[in-house]
Image: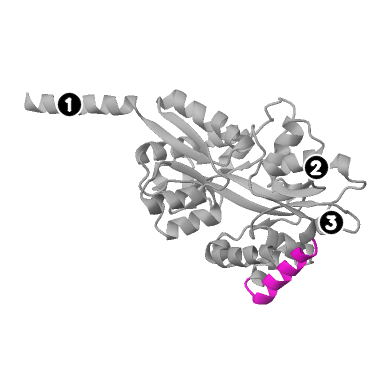
Amino acid sequence: MKKTLILTTALTGFAFAASAQEVTVMSWGGAYTKSQVEAYHKPFMAETGITVNSVDADNPATPIKAQVEAGNVTVDVADVEYSDAIRLCDEGLLEEIDHSMLPDAPDGTSPQDDFIEGALTDCAVANIVWSTVFAYNTENVTSAPDSIDDFFNLVDYPGKRGMRKSAKANLEMALMADGVPAAEVYDLLETDEGVDRAFAKLDTIKDEIVWWEAGAQPPQLLADGEVVMSTAYNGRIFNAAIGEGQPFEIVWDGQIMDFDLFVVPRGAPNKEEALQFIAFSTDTQRLADQASWISYGPARKSSGALVGKFMDGETDMAPHMPTAEANLENALVNNFEFWADRDTELSERFNAWLAQ
């Protein structure tokens, strides 16, 4: 009788907890968050009954670091860039993730073999491959740029340039525009001479730069004619061009490829639900589903064959992915360890350069 009472009490408590289950997911906003809401949040809520609260930030790594350090964590899952995932994990600000909780591919391939190389770390699970590219409004140029050199060429392509207010990606693009082969960029950035060279190249367009901080800004800058060209996240330009009919074109030359990954801040109030959300959202089908909403490549190999058309039912998504063969001719893969180690130092140098 006593055992029955204990079991009943326990089950009652579980039922009460289940009825109030929720998970708060922080992402980057705009078309990207929409793709996650449609592909992950809504199906997850329908299948589990767990409420997903969606919140956004210009860079989720910043608020979750502040929350953990303040001991006031309100976010359960955050979508962050790779170097931030590594750095936050090294600083003890993230929960470790047991990859055995992730589902196998439909053919039984383990997650360790199915996720592309580098997509699983001690504290993170990748969901997309994306790129920083540059784009232009076809109505605002007399001839079409086709290389990263053109972005820095104010003689043949006069006008303002949009750039993310960050050292990351800008230094790499500057060196590639200055003639450095992609394969040599990070070796050069490890030297003082290489960093000086990158900033010297940025100096050549500094007076023409309009700085942006949120991913939704470059498409707006291009649409308003405030800039002739802008660096941007490839998916934001795709959605503006294909989804909204804007006359934008991406230049893939000099693209910088990166991962975004799901992490769980240390002390997340709903850790178990967070892990459940991550496992659900990074299965083969969900990652393929997201790619029908935005042109970011899924982080699982098995998802590739399931990627079809955009939500318009007409546009094939594969050619718009950063990983499409035609887009890889002069691509650079972000060196995550480099930025995890050097981000603070180079950001300080960048901010000092901005103030000059």
Q: Nearer the viewer, residue 137 or 42?
A: 137
Q: Residue at x 36, y 38 (%)?
A: 270
Q: Residue at x 63, y 45 (%)?
A: 214
Q: Which mark is residue 249?
A: 2
Q: Which residues are magenta?
A: 190-205
- Residue 106 in sight from this viewpoint: no
Q: Which residue is mark 3?
A: 150
Answer yes or no: do the residues labelled 2 and 1 have beta carbons within 8 Å?
A: no
Q: Is residue 92 above or below residue 309?
A: below
Q: Which residue is mark 1?
A: 9
Marked residue nearer the N-terminal end (1 or 3): 1
Answer yes or no: do the residues labelled 1 and 3 have beta carbons within 8 Å?
A: no
Q: Nearer the viewer, residue 126 or 174?
A: 174
| Magenta-colored stretch includes residue 199 | yes
Which amino acid is tagged 2?
Glu
Q: Is residue 139 left or right of residue 246?
A: right
Q: Is residue 308 above or below residue 264?
A: above
Which amino acid is tagged 1?
Thr
Which quadrant holds the N terminus? top left
| Magenta-colored stretch includes residue 319 | no
Cα distance between the residues tagged 3 and 2: 14 Å
In the image, residue 112 lies at what x, y percent? 47, 49
